Image (cartoon, rainbow, N blue to C red):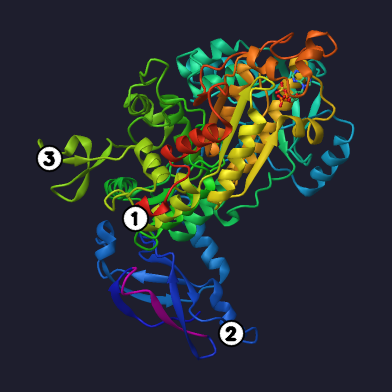
Amino acid sequence: MSSGTQKTGQLGSELTQIDGQLSGGSTRRFDLISLSAPTLHPCGLFLCRAAPASSISAEDNAAQNFLHCQVHAVPPQRTLAANRTSTRVHLFAILMHDETVDSLERTSAAHLPVAHGGELIDLYVGSERRADIKAESKGLPSWDLTPRQLCDLELFLNGGFSPLRGFMTKADYERVCNEMRLESGILWPIPITLDVSEDFAKSLAAGRSKIALRDPEGVMLALLHVEEVWKPDRREEAQAVFNTTSPTHPGVFHVLNKSNPWYVGGRLEGVQRPSSYDFKTLRLSPSELRQQFARQGWRRIVAFQTRNPMHRAHVELTFRACKQAEASLLIHPAVGLTKPGDVDYFTRVRCYQVVLTKYPRGTAKLFLLPLAMRMAGPREAIWHALIRKNCGCSHMIIGRDHAGPGKDANGKAFYDPYAAQELFQKHEAEIGVTMVPFHNMVYVEDKAKYLPEDEVPRDARVLNLSGTELRQRLNEGRLIPDWFTYSEVIQELRRSFPPRHQQGFTVFFTGLSGAGKSTIANVLLIKLLEIGGRPVTLFDGDLVRKHLSSELGFSREHRDLNIRRIGYVASEITKNRGIAICAPIAPYDAMRKEVRAMIAPLGGFIMVHLSTPVEVCEERDRKGLYAKARAGIIKEFTGISDPYEEPTDADITINTAELAPDEAAQEIILHLESEGFIGNPSNSRVS
Ligand code: PPS
């Protein structure tokens, strides 16, 4: 053991370094990293980690010992913990062997809340059993996990879903749906089931079959011992869990339209952790998180769940929550599946990393949760808290409309904005996590600060910026005010969501053969190339049929496949900020809508209907196809012997009997300009 210099100062600001004496007699400077000190360690010391301030040479053996040293901050009085950022303390470093550090960490870990059901589950098997399972798996049926199932599996295996040991069996499922409890009586609000196709379900024998669960690349992640196979009533499930069967609710939509019709329940054995190549250091399992907290000396931890980028209001809210709970902060965003249309998690995590720097050193941590959200509002709030308890958190922030699914078809919210807080409160003791409830934070201009809605003085001027308004401002490159968020966050958001004149878009023509699609598309191509700035690709109907869909005919099925292919390629181009011009007949409304839905979230989608009447097209008959169709030589010819569904949702409608190609293309250019997809960037105001 060896001690460092004594110092006095403010934790995290003045006291960031300390000189430590090596056992050999020489001294070295250490950075105090992860200054925590939210509570006193039972032995009366604040625990801090230290790392050598300059790099250590391989030869410097004595200094190597310091890599795992602890720096203890000794408070002059023991009553200082409450307001630690202004606490002046003495610091001196004590070099300890790893075993001593471990034992101190164990003591700290004992202060974290116990996992739900009493034990933190770990379903990963040891190396011998792993080898046996892998050998056995060759003869077993395989199930390729869907993205949602993959998220669920990870949280089963690492104990995030403690006390669950596998996908729910029917008894658990039914009791969870109806009473929010497992069969054992333990509180659990969300059913977690493995949904499979009918054919697959029928190939299984309950009590005997085992399934190799695989990731999309075919890597076996777990073994499922099949205990039960059944066909659930998914409408009943939706009603029980979401309190509605409206498909406008994203959770209901998934249950009714995206999940498979049969469920399989059973115990899991984990073979391998699902692989993630992004933000690896931020992906800690519940037990790793617990270790991390113990190492920091964190006993009271308030979790902040989010699926959105964080702005000043969120930071203010979390500051207040920490103060109220006298706790450290875990920013714990869901990075599995969230609500469709949400900001992608890559962008979000970069924003969180910026926001993290706004907290005093050592008071907040960011880790990612691979959770597939259900948007179940009140029930989901409880679920979130149980998962966070398993991760070692003692408190959980529940704000306005927690895990809210948005509005129904009539514009009415599915859940009361404070229903989650009410349900949580009812079960708080059983949840074992203290709720830190919050109203919406709003910016009060006269006071130049954020306040919860319910604390705003009467007649005060309040500013707020909705998510929709923020998206609009990003789209139009307009100013985003400083009171709303940090300039570095705006910068990140602008990188991912550039103004419209830098986004990609697709111009999608539809109309009969001979309506003028190819001609106008070619003129448009030239005009856009003339404007420049983005690559432009033209998918003409005939050329696509030659290069992309050469094996397809003109049945409805083949036409749909052809349009889906065009839509897919155009969506990739749009996503990568290029311009795609598509000019197929695309006679079916449903397929056109599918393509719009595929492309619109990635940039622009402009549908141009060439409404030139069939008589005009037939009279033109540039390729002689109408004559052949009339003679019955060409079958299933659109407009003659096959249907064309007129669009009612076109953005532009042009009858080429009345407009020259140049004029028609100009109309489209003017529309693109008015929508902001082309234009003078200097008109935009970027903060
Ligand atoms: S679809 O329905 O969108 O898949 O059709 P598309 O791929 O755009 O059609 C491309 C060209 O195929 C020629 N052609 C036919 N069109 C319609 N019906 C039948 N049965 C047919 N047989 C061949 C026609 O020239 C289409 O090109 P355009 O540019 O529309 O004239």
Q: Residue at x 48, y 14 (%)?
A: 246
Q: Secondary structure at mark 1?
A: loop
Q: Which mark is residue 644?
A: none
The residue under label 3 is 460
Q: Which mark is residue 687?
A: 1
Q: Secondary structure at mark 2?
A: helix
Q: Which kind of residue does numbered mark 2 sit on? A: Ala
- Which one is nearer the viewer's eye here, 230 or 546? 546
Residue 465 appearing in the image: yes
Q: Position of residue 369 (x, y in %)?
A: 53, 43
Residue at the image point whose x is 69% and y is 32% from the top: 566
Taking the spot 80% from the left edge, 44% from the top edge, the residue there is 130
* Quarter assignment of residue 575: top right
**From which residue to which does the magenta span run?**
12-22
Q: Badge 3 local density, few (<14 within 10 Å), some, or many (20+)?
A: few
The image's mark for residue 62 is 2
Q: Residue farthest to the left?
A: 459
628 to the left or right of 664? right
21 within the magenta span: yes
**Secondary structure category for the residue under label 3:** loop
> How busy is the neighbourhood of tag 2: few (under 14 within 10 Å), some, or many (20 plus)?
few
Tell me whether circle 2 and circle 1 mark residues in contact (CB < 8 Å). no
Label 3 vs 1, first from the N-terminus: 3
Above or below, 4 against 515 in this view is below
